[in-house]
Image (cartoon, rainbow, N blue to C red):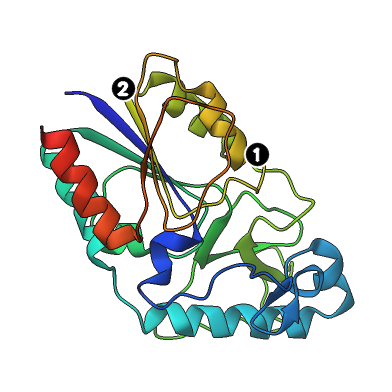
Amino acid sequence: MKRLVILTGAGMSAESGISTFRDSNGLWENHHVEDVATPEGFERNPTLVLNFYNDRRRELLATTPNEGHKGLKALENYFEVRIITQNVDNLHEQANSKNVIHLHGELMKACSVRDLNTTYAIDPKQPDQHLGDKDPFGQQLRPFIVWFGEAVPMIEPAIKWVKECDIFVIIGTSLNVYPAAALINYVCKEQPIFIIDPKPVATERKDIHFIHCGASEGVKKLIQMLKK
C-alpha cells in the first residue's frame, strides 16, 4: 500500500469554524501574536494567555470535523495515510485518522513550565486552565502549544515521514511558517505533490499539481484524482 503523507494548516480546519492562527493584520482574535503565542507573553501576563487558550479550547469543543477531515480518513481505504498538521485542534483525531503528528502542539493537552515534553490530557468537561494549576511536581501548567521562539520537537519524525512518502499533499497552508514549510523540500523528485488551497501558494518546486479550492472540495477532487 502506497504511503500518502499530508501536511495540513489552518485552511484545513477553517471550514469547521476554527479561527485561523494569524490573519493579514498580524492579530489572532484581536490579540497581538507576541502577547499570546510566545514564552515572553506568558511570562508577562500568564492569565491573559491562559484565558486566550481557554477560549480557543471552548471554540474547539463546539466544532466537528468537516468533509475534508472525513475525506482524509476515507483515503485510508486506499493508502497508508500519515497526517502532519500545523493545527493544534484534534479534528483529525475526531475524524478517526490513525496516524497524526502535531508540529505545533495540542490544544487539549497541558504541560508544565519546567517540562514541555510531559503532557497531561485536559478534561473536555473542565477545559479551562487557571493560574495556580500545577503538575504533580508543583510546577505551573501551561498550554501544550509550541510558541514562537520554541523548538519544534516533532519536526524530525515529520521529516522521516516525508522522505518515505510515495505521494505528498499540502492542504490549507501558505508555506510561510518554518520549519513546517521546509518539509516539501524532503519529497523525492519523482514523487507527486498536490497542493489544495483557494489562494496561490508560492513554492520553488515546479512539479506541483494545484487544486484551487477549499479543503472539503479539494479533498473530494484529490480522492477522485488518486483513485484514477
Of 56 and 192, the residue lying toward us: 192
| Residue 119 seen in this snapshot | no
Of 167 and 41, the residue lying toward us: 167
The quarter of the image holding the C terminus is top left
- Residue ID at (54%, 70%): 20
* Residue that carries the numbered disc 2 in the rendered image: 166
Q: Position of residue 90 (x, y in %)?
A: 39, 63
Q: Position of residue 53 (x, y in %)?
A: 61, 77
Is the residue marked by circle 2 packed among few (<14), some (14-19), or many (20+) residues within 10 Å? some
Q: Is residue 33 above or below residue 61?
A: above
Residue 163, quarter of the rendered image: top left
- Residue ID at (33%, 59%): 215
Local SS, label 1: loop
Q: Is residue 158 above or below residue 57?
A: above
Horizontal side of 127 relative to 150 (left or right) equals: left
As measured in the structure, the alpha-carbon distance from the residue carrying label 2 to the one carrying label 1 is 21 Å
Mark 2 or mark 1: whose residue is earlier in sequence: 2
Of 67 and 63, the residue lying toward us: 67
- Residue ID at (28%, 54%): 218
Q: Position of residue 74 (x, y in %)?
A: 15, 49
Local SS, label 2: loop
* Residue that carries the numbered disc 1 in the rendered image: 179
- Residue ID at (35%, 58%): 213
The quarter of the image holding the N terminus is top left
Horizontal side of 9 relative to 3 (left or right) equals: right
Q: Is residue 79 above or below residue 199?
A: above
Q: Do callouts 2 and 1 mark residues in contact (Cβ within 8 Å)?
A: no
Is the residue marked by circle 1 packed among few (<14), some (14-19), or many (20+) residues within 10 Å? few
